[in-house]
Image (cartoon, rainbow, N blue to C red):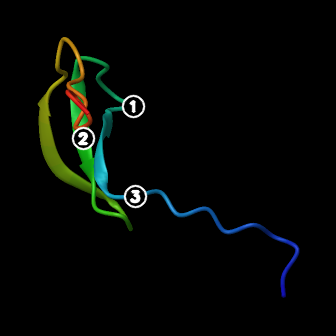
Amino acid sequence: MSDQEIRVVPAGWYEDRDDSSLVRWWNGLDWTSHTAPKPDRVVSDAAGA
């Protein structure tokens, strides 16, 4: 086994490094061309749990 730790970043929307007013879709392997306006707030899936 290697001494290097492999970090897997799950697919999802992340802040765009070139434009902080946008989020960009990470498909789990690479950045896509899909962007969206950065939301004002994050809504948790666990709301009401």
Residue extending farthest bottom: 1
Q: Earlier in the sequence, mark 1 or mark 3?
A: 3
Q: Provide the residue designation for mark 2.
A: 24
> Could you tell me residue 2's position as x and y percent?
84, 82
Identified at 14% across, 39% down, the residue is 35
Q: Provide the residue designation for mark 1.
A: 17
Q: Are marks 2 and 1 in contact (CB under 8 Å)?
A: yes
Q: Disc 2 marks which amino acid?
A: Arg
Identified at 67% across, 68% down, the residue is 6
> Could you tell me residue 12's position as x and y percent?
28, 49
Q: Disc 1 marks which amino acid?
A: Arg
Quadrant of the rendered structure where residue 7 is?
bottom right
Mark sitting on residue 10: 3
Q: CA distance from mark 3 to mark 2?
A: 13 Å
Q: Which is more toward the observer, 48 or 43?
A: 48
Identified at 81% across, 70% down, the residue is 4
Q: Earlier in the sequence, mark 2 or mark 1?
A: 1
Q: Which is more toward the observer, 35 or 48?
A: 48
Mark 2, secondary structure of its residue:
strand
Q: Nearer the viewer, mark 3 or mark 2?
A: 3
